[in-house]
Amino acid sequence: MRKVLAIDAGGTKLTCAVINGNGEIISDVEKYSTPKNIDDLVKLFKEIINKHEDNIDITAFATAGAVNINNTKVDSSTPNMPRGYNQLDFSSLSKKRVFVENDANCAAWAEYIIGAAQGEKNTITITLGTGVGGGFIVDGKLLRGKSGRAGEVGSMKSNSKDRVCTCGRKNCFESYASGTGLKITAEEIAHSDEIFKKSIFNKKTPKEITTYDIIDGLKQNDEYSKKVFDIWKKDLITGLINITNIFDPESIIISGGMGKFLDTEEIQNAVNSEIVVSDIKIKLAKAGNYSGMIGAALLACQKC
Amino acid sequence: MRKVLAIDAGGTKLTCAVINGNGEIISDVEKYSTPKNIDDLVKLFKEIINKHEDNIDITAFATAGAVNINNTKVDSSTPNMPRGYNQLDFSSLSKKRVFVENDANCAAWAEYIIGAAQGEKNTITITLGTGVGGGFIVDGKLLRGKSGRAGEVGSMKSNSKDRVCTCGRKNCFESYASGTGLKITAEEIAHSDEIFKKSIFNKKTPKEITTYDIIDGLKQNDEYSKKVFDIWKKDLITGLINITNIFDPESIIISGGMGKFLDTEEIQNAVNSEIVVSDIKIKLAKAGNYSGMIGAALLACQKC
């Protein structure tokens, strides 16, 4: 069985391990802070690869950013990665084959092969964290589009409140359904709704309310927090309805930090009551924290 | 080369012809009114099939409604077809092989194989008529989903004005971007905007304004009509941005009656200025009025 050195390169952390063709981690997991400049980052990549190169067949990267159709290079702007990251030809980093894929796509593939969507050939993994990411499996294949950038579900427009997203565009799904979106909804409701005056957070200014406050407020039965969370859920559900009606998938898998605050059965019932395709399952991700690395390794084995 | 008897079964009209494996119509095109009850419809299907059966290899239907994954039966409600239509097993209609596919999917396939999207393996055809239909080609294959119902782009939610769609749901893309949507927008603006008082249609009640009035008003430089049409276009563009960000297609092909009123270059520029994937082309459909029949025949040749 082939062995893959998998590297998950995020804006803050960099994680790597050796993974076999079954998606099993067969080495220690190494963790690094992502260097802030491109030379240091390339140096770190090379050190990691040099250390493992003789014992592996492929190096596979799960990375932030849009990856080109040949899986060799990031070709979008990557504001959280060092400047110059999208100039890097990953194949130059190793004597052996190098494979690169977007991290949300890798996570979706991991869920499909070894996680919550096993055997479901039409499945979507949505990552709800600081932002919103998506990976789409269509008839057992990863949806990549003409240039490899498909799956930008965070940039879907699902509302018309004229909220400005961090990307500068208006009303991106991400600006509603992410953790950041929850904070913005909290701020909006604090400004516009009398309910805030009775909230346990009424000593804070609307801008000071955090995502964690709202989650905490839910546990304390705070009516304002419940209202904010309900609106956030409704915006999330609207986006899930959209992609369900277009893809007719078997399941949507929710990953990312916000997932654990959701009652997936409640979301599933809400989505199924409004879609025009047949019912879907909504489940939490199962492939774990290393789904990016595992998905990258599994995809690399399939494609290289 | 195989010959296909292609039948396009719509709520009002039924069209049929014999088509070869290149998508060329090689017989007269016959046209019928769609019978209002299921027995008469089945009788008509059988008469048409009996007439051609000895000279063809497959019968292919392009039909309203969602078609099951085996391409044998419509399994959604079809309000415009006779009651019982979704009980009909199409394979019972002929001694030879029968193939059924949704008409919007057939149109998309025709555009991909012989129309405006030739050679573009990731392409979407959007039909803007009384309603909004969609067919998605992903990596050279028709997107069908788990049950065959994928592509319900008309049911995407792309606005939050709380407009009730004909399907009973709220804010379906179809209720904005269709010809019907244009009429509703016209009515809303006539109620809410002073501009209507100066319109050439100000003798009508808001409810009386038709889609055709607005198109006519554009030609006569009526400011109210221009405003209505601009809002309609903006809603259309929002939906096209959504599907572009998710699919990263090479092109979106616009078919249906509303297409001819659009400046596709203007729409293309507006979409490309807001998407996060690379630029797409927006073009009018080329496969013509018989694209449903042609697409059904071509798909049948591929799948049977």
Image: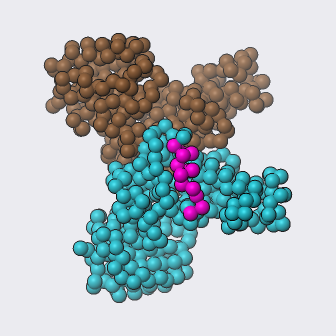
Chain colours: A brown, B cyan
Residue A32 relative to residue B220: left or right: left
**The C terminus of chain A, quarter of image:** top left
Which residue: 33% across, 24% down? A88
User: Where A92 falls versus A286 (above or below)?
Assistant: above
> Main structural element of the magenta stretch: helix, strand or loop?
helix
Residue A104 relative to residue A240: left or right: left
Near-viewer residue (A74 or B131) = A74
Residue A18 within the segment the image draws in magenta: no
**The N terminus of chain A, quarter of image:** top left
Near-viewer residue (A160 or B91) = A160
Which residue: 58% across, 42% down? A158
Which residue: 19% across, 19% down? A53
Residue B269 within the segment the image draws in magenta: yes
Q: Position of residue A126 (x, y in %)?
A: 46, 36
Q: Position of residue B179 (x, y in %)?
A: 62, 62
Count of numbered circles in the view: 0
Q: Quadrant of residue A118?
A: top left
Residue B103 relative to residue A62: left or right: right
Q: Position of residue A273 (x, y in %)?
A: 56, 51
User: Where B140 falls versus B47 (above or below)?
Assistant: above
Q: Is residue A208 visible?
A: yes
User: Where A211 falls versus B10 (above or below)?
Assistant: above
State the extent of the magenta-drawn residues as a range. Answer: B260-272
Q: Is residue A270 visible?
A: no
Near-viewer residue (A67 or A233) = A67
Which residue: 46% across, 21% down? A80
Q: Position of residue A196 (x, y in %)?
A: 74, 26
Q: Quadrant of residue A110?
A: top left
